[in-house]
Image: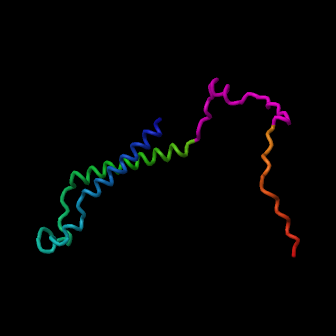
Amino acid sequence: MLHTLITFAHGILCFAIIALVLLQRGKGADAGAGFGAGASGTVFGARGSSTFFSKLTAVLATMFFLTSMSLAWFATRPQAPRQESIVDTAGSEPAAVPAPAVDGDAVPSLPASDAPEEPAPDGQ
């Protein structure tokens, strides 16, 4: 049950990270303004404080790594043998059913073909 819940959360985190990354503006978007704006001495402009999207992406990425590690842990831990219940063991062995007796006269034969037989080639 916990494995299924973590797998579901992992999938939701994947889609959330993809959406957040696509919504963000790239770092190189300010490159043209950096040359003429004179905002800073760097080529690509001043790097201000982190935006809400970048902080949220970092949080979701951390959660993604945690779910990845927990799924890896679930996959590598040894599985305990499952204890079978009485219902499982009762239905596991099929009951012996005797084969029905077949009478030779009761077996239907194939109908004969009405087409005449063709003679076999003589090899000429």
Picture layout, residue 119 above or below residue 19: below
Residue 104 left/right relative to 41: right
Seen from this angle, which residue lies furthest bottom? 124
Does residue 93 show up magenta in the picture?
yes
Image quarter of residue 67 = top left
Q: Report the front residue among 15 and 105.
A: 105
> Count of labels shown?
0
Residue 16 left/right relative to 108: left
Residue 110 left/right relative to 9: right
Image quarter (top left, top right, bottom left or bottom right) of the C terminus: bottom right
Image quarter of residue 44 = bottom left
For the rendered model, the colour scheme is: rainbow
Span highlighted in magenta in the image: 78-106
Image quarter of residue 87 = top right
Q: Residue at x 27, y 49 (%)?
A: 56
Q: Which residue is drawn at 87% across and 73% down?
A: 123
Q: Which residue is drawn at 28% across and 53% down?
A: 20
| Dominant secondary structure (helix, strand or loop) of the stretch shown in magenta | loop
Give the percent coordinates (x, y) of residue 6.
43, 41
Q: Which residue is drawn at 12% across and 68% down?
A: 39
Give the percent coordinates (x, y) of residue 112.
80, 49
Give the percent coordinates (x, y) of residue 30.
18, 67
Does residue 121 show up magenta in the picture?
no
Q: Report the front residue among 56 and 91.
A: 91
Picture layout, residue 23 above or below residue 123: above
Give the percent coordinates (x, y) of residue 32.
17, 72
Q: Report the front residue among 9 and 110.
A: 110
Q: Report the front residue among 9 and 114.
A: 114
